[in-house]
Image: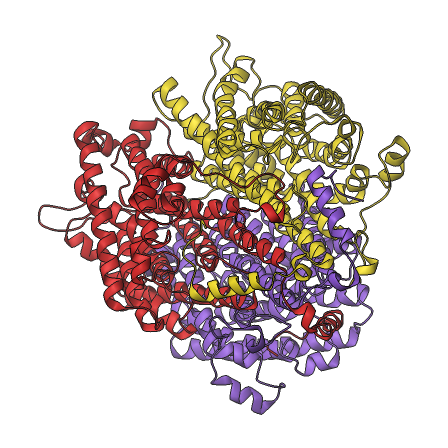
Chain colours: A purple, B red, C yellow
Amino acid sequence: MKLRTLSLATVATTIASGAMAQEAAVAVPTDSVFILNSLLFLIGGFLVFWMAAGFSMLEAGLVRSKNVTMQLTKNMGLFGFACIAYYLIGYNLMYPLGTWAVDGVLSGVWGVAVMEAVGVAAADADDYSYAATGSDFFFQLMFCAATASIVSGALAERIKLWPFLIFTIVLTGVIYPLQASWKWGGGFLDAMGFLDFAGSTVVHSVGGWAALAGALILGPRIGKYTKDGRTVPFMASNLPLATLGTFILWMGWFGFNGGSQLAMGSVGDVADISRIFANTNAAAAAGAIAALILTQVLYKKPDLTMILNGALAGLVAITAEPLTPTLGAATLIGAIGGVIVVFGVPFLDKLKIDDVVGAIPVHLMAGIWGTIAVVFTNGDASLGTQLYSILVVGVFTFVVSGALWFILKMTMGIRVSEEDEITGLDKSELGMPAYDIVN
Amino acid sequence: MKLRTLSLATVATTIASGAMAQEAAVAVPTDSVFILNSLLFLIGGFLVFWMAAGFSMLEAGLVRSKNVTMQLTKNMGLFGFACIAYYLIGYNLMYPLGTWAVDGVLSGVWGVAVMEAVGVAAADADDYSYAATGSDFFFQLMFCAATASIVSGALAERIKLWPFLIFTIVLTGVIYPLQASWKWGGGFLDAMGFLDFAGSTVVHSVGGWAALAGALILGPRIGKYTKDGRTVPFMASNLPLATLGTFILWMGWFGFNGGSQLAMGSVGDVADISRIFANTNAAAAAGAIAALILTQVLYKKPDLTMILNGALAGLVAITAEPLTPTLGAATLIGAIGGVIVVFGVPFLDKLKIDDVVGAIPVHLMAGIWGTIAVVFTNGDASLGTQLYSILVVGVFTFVVSGALWFILKMTMGIRVSEEDEITGLDKSELGMPAYDIVN
Amino acid sequence: MKLRTLSLATVATTIASGAMAQEAAVAVPTDSVFILNSLLFLIGGFLVFWMAAGFSMLEAGLVRSKNVTMQLTKNMGLFGFACIAYYLIGYNLMYPLGTWAVDGVLSGVWGVAVMEAVGVAAADADDYSYAATGSDFFFQLMFCAATASIVSGALAERIKLWPFLIFTIVLTGVIYPLQASWKWGGGFLDAMGFLDFAGSTVVHSVGGWAALAGALILGPRIGKYTKDGRTVPFMASNLPLATLGTFILWMGWFGFNGGSQLAMGSVGDVADISRIFANTNAAAAAGAIAALILTQVLYKKPDLTMILNGALAGLVAITAEPLTPTLGAATLIGAIGGVIVVFGVPFLDKLKIDDVVGAIPVHLMAGIWGTIAVVFTNGDASLGTQLYSILVVGVFTFVVSGALWFILKMTMGIRVSEEDEITGLDKSELGMPAYDIVN
C-alpha cells in the first residue's frame, strides 16, 4: 500500500468502509455522480479562471515597462468581453441543440446560455446522471477566455485597445465556438476520430493561429529588427511577475486538463484524473528543464524566459492527450515542447514575426506537436486524422482571423502611431504609468 | 447533451451509472451529504482566505510606494488579529447557542469556538446530516476577516498602525459578529425576511460603513484636496500588483458566493452552486466592462483602476443574490455596480472624503445596490425589508464604528504626524522601504 | 445549529436527506470512499504545488534586486528536477514494495513510479477502498519538492546554479525519500511510534538541515558580517512579492496539512480535516501576531519580514500535529513558532551563519519545536521518541548533505567568484536583470 502510514482513526475508518462493501452498498449513487461531476467542473473551472490572472501577469512581466498598464487593461477587457460574448452567442454555437449541423448552428447563433432552474430536483435536472448545466457553462467559458488570452501577448506593445477587443468578441463569440463544435460539439472532426483531450489544437493552436495572423498584419514593433537583419532584444520589465504568471498557469492547467475528464463519479474516472494531474505536472517540469539545459548548452547561460515558456510549452504539448501516456512518456512529450520553444522563438525572429511573449511557439507550435504526439500513446488515434484536423482548424482560424484583422486595419486601424509606440502606450493611450516606485 | 464529446471510457461509465440507477441506489447517503457539505466549506473557506491576499495586493498596488510596507503590515496584522478575535469572541457571538437573544449574546461573548472531537463517529457529530463544525468555523472566520480587510484600504497612508489594529479587533470580535447574527445567526432581520445571500450588506457594506466613519474622523491625506477645490491624483505604485489583487479577489469570490449555498449534498444544491459560480463571474465581467466603456466615453481614456474596481463592484453587487438571477440579469446587476464605481469615486472626492483605494464606492455603494437588486430577481424579497435592513445595519455599524474611532482618536491618536505622513510611513514608522529595485 | 440561516430550498433538501437516512442508505459506498480520498489528494496536491510559487515569490522578494532572476531560475529548476528525480527514484524508494527493508530499498532505487491503468475498473484498482495511485504520487511529489524549495532560500545570492541543482536531484531523489520512508513508508521511526502528521521533521527540518549544512560550507555573503562583529542588513528587493509568497504558502498549507489526513470518505475524516484547516490557520495567524508584537516591543518598530516569517514558523510548528490541538492550543503552538523566528534570526547572525531568507529559523527551529509540541496535545506521543527521531533524521540529513556539499565544493565549486557576487548573479551569471522598470 503506497501511502503514508495511516493514523489509527483512519485505518479504522478504512477497514470499516471495506467491511461494509457488500454488493448493494458499493456503487456510487446516481445523485452522487451528478454532484461529483459538477464539482469537477466547478473546481476545474475556477482553476482555469485563474489562468486569466496567469496570462495577465506573464504578459505584464514580459512587456517593457512603458506598456504594462495597457497590457493589463487588455487582459481585463478581453476576459470581460469573452464572458459576455460566450454567454450571448458562443456557448450555444459550440453545443447546438441536438446534433451539429448548419441549421443547428444558425439556430444556435441567436440563443443565449440558459442554466438549470433554482433548486432543481433530481428528476428535473437537464442532464440527470451527468452534471449541472451551469457548471458545464462555467467550465467551458473559461476555455474560451483562455483562447483569447493567448492572442493578447503576441500582439502587445503596438496594437490599439479597441480593435483588439473587437477581435476578441468575434473570436470568443464565433470563431472559437464554431471550430470547437467540430470536435467538442460532436461535429465532423469528432466523427472522424480526431482526438484532442483538453485542447492542444482546439484551444491553444487556435489562439496561436489568431495571434499569428494578427502579428503578420500588424507588423513588428519599431526597432525590433534592424535593417542588417539583427534582432534587438527588448528587456522584460518584471521577471518575478512573469514567473508568477507561469506558476499560475501551471496550477490552472490541473483544472484545464483534469477537468476535461468531464466526470469524477466513478473509480475509473478519478483514477484517470489522477493520471492526468501527474502527467500534466511531469510535462511542465520536463519542458522547463529541457529549456534550462538547452539554453545552457546553446548560449552558455540559462535563459529564464525560455524556461518559463518551456514549462508552458510542456503543458500545451500534453494537453491533447494527458491521460494515456505513462509518466515517462509525459516527461518526454513535455521536454520536446520545451525544445520547440527554444528553437521556435529565434525562428520566428528570423522571419521577422514579432511575438512579444513567445505565444506562437508555446501555443501554436507546441500545440501542433502535442496533437501529433497523441498517436504515440493512444491506440485510437490516427496520424492522418490528427494532421487533417490540425490543418482544417488551422486554415479556418488563420483565414477568418486574418480577414478580420484586415477589415479592422482598413476600417479603424489596428496600430498606434509611431510616436505613441515610442512613447509607450501607458502614457500615450492611457495616461497612467504602471509603476511609480521610489526606492 | 451540452458536453464535450465524451471519451469512450467515460461514456461507458456514465451509461453504467445510469443503468444502476434503481430506486435503492439513487439517493446520496447521509454520511456523504455531511462530507460534501463540509467539503464545500473547506474549499469555499480556502478561496475566501485567498481574498486576504487579494486585498493586500490590491491595496499595496494602489497606495504610493512610500506607504507600501505599512499597508502590507496592516493587512497581515488585521488578518492575524481577526482570526484570534473571531475565535475568542466573534463566532460564538454570531451564532449564540440556541436562538438569538440578549442573554444568548451575553453568554456568547465569553465563549470560544469549539470544534468537533478528533475522529468523531457519525452518531456523535455535532450536527450530523449537516456539516463539520470546524469547517463551518473556518468558512465563517474568513468572512469576518474580509470585512476588516475592506477598512484598511480606505484609511491607508495616514492612519497609525496600532489604533487601526485595535479597531480591527473590536470590528471582528464584536461589531461584525453582532450585526451578522441579526441575519445569519437567525436574528430579527432574518425573521423579518431580509435576504442577503452572501453578504452585500452583512459583509461588504459593514466594511464600507466602518471605513466611511474612519475616513471622516481621520480626514484626507495631506495634499489630496487643494484649497480651490481640486482633487490631486496620487499615483498608484504598482498596477500589476493591483490587477493581481483583483484577480485573486475574483477567484476567491467563487468561494464567497458559492460556499454560501451552505450545502452540496444534493442535485439541487450543486446545480445552485453552479448557477452561483456562473452568475458571480458574469457580474464581475460586466462590472469591469461597464467601467471600461464608461471611462472611455467620459474621459476618452479607459482607466485601469476604475476597471479593477468595476469588477469588484460587480462582485459585491451580485453577492446579495447570486442564485436567482439569470445570466443576463447577473450581467446587468454587475454592470450597474461598475457604473456606480465610476461615479462614486469622484463623488466622494467632491465631498473631500479620501478613500485611497475606492473601498467605499466598491463595498458600500455597490453593496447597497446589490441588496436592493435582490427584489428584481427573488420573489421572496420585500423592498421595504431590504431598505430597512440596510438602514439598521448601516446606522449601527456607522455609529458604533464612529464612536470607536473617536475614542481612539481622543486617547491614543489615530493619525501619524504631518512630517511622518509626508516622509511616508515605510520610512518614518517602520524604517523599511517596500522596494529596493535597481534596474 | 451553527449555520447561517439556510435558504428554504436548502432546508428542504436537508430535511429530505435526513428523512431518507434509513439504515441502508447511511453508509458511504466504497466507490465513493475511493473517489473522495483521491479527490483529497488532488486538491491537497495542487495546493501544495502552489507552495512552489510561494517559495519562489518569497525568496525573489527577499533577495537583493541584483540576484532575483537567478533566484527565480533556481526555483523553476529545482522544482523541475525534483519532479523527475522523485518519479525516477524517490517515490519507489520512499514506499518500497511491501515492507521497508534494505533489500526493499535496493529494489526500489531502480524502480520508477507507475500509475493505475487508464479507465481502471473498481475491481482492478491498485488499492481499491483507498485511493488512486496517481493521486497519491501527485500529492507526495509536491512534499518532496517543497523540501528542496526550503534549501534555495537560505543559500541565495552566492551559490552557483548547477551545483545547487545537482544537490537538489540527490535531495529529492534519495535523501528526502529515504528518511521519509522511516516514518511515512512504515520504517523504523514509524514502528517506534514517532508522530509527525504532515512533516515538521520529515519535510521542514530536513530542508532546514540541508540548508544549514550548505550555509556552513558555502559561507556568508560578502559584506554581511563586518570584522568588528556587526551584521549588515541587506535590503529586500520587493516586500509585496515576499508578502504574496507568504500568503501563497499559507494557502498551500491547507493542502499540506489537510491532505495529510489521507482520507475524506467518512464523517470522522472530514471532521478531522476541518479541525486541521482551522488549526493550521490559527497557528499561522498567531505566529504572525507574535512576531508583530515582539518586534514592536523589542525594536519599537514592527518588522514585516519577521511577521511574514512568523506566520510561516507558525505553520511549520503546527505541521507535526495539526489535528489534536484545540484552537487555543494551536494558537499557542503557532505563537511560539513566531517567537522562535524573532530570536532565531539574530542568533544565526551571531554565529555568522548567513541564511538569506530566514529558512533555518522557520523550517528547522520551528520544525523541531512543532515536533516536540506533539507531546502536549497527542497522548500517543512520547517525548523520548520525538527527540530521538528529530536527532536521527537531523544527523542523517546534516551529515549526508554536508558530505554532498563538500564533494560538490571540491569538484566543481559551489560559490561564484567574488567579482560576480558583487556584480550580482543576474548580470554576471545570467545576463538578464529581473526588473527594467522606468517610473
Q: Is residue B328 above or below residue B82?
A: below
Residue A57 location, x and y as percent?
Answer: 49, 52
Depth check: B167 or C295 in front? B167
Q: Quadrant of the C terminus of chain B?
A: top left
- Residue placed most toward the observer, B329 or A336: B329
Residue C5 is left or right of residue A387, and the answer is left
Residue B146 location (% of width, % of height): 38, 47
- For this view, does A367 lie left or right of residue B347? right
Residue at (23% x, 42% y) in the render: B401
**Quarter of the image where one finds residue A22:** bottom right
* Quadrant in the picture for residue C17: bottom right
The outermost residue toward the bottom is A103
Q: Is residue A18 visible?
A: yes
Q: Would residue A401 appear left or right of A414 to someone viewing this image? A: right
Q: Is residue C163 above or below residue A335?
A: above
Of B107 and A299, nearer the camera is B107
Across and down, in percent, residue C204 comes to 63, 30
Residue B282 against residue B308 in the figure, above or below: below
Residue B214: x percent and y percent?
A: 22, 42
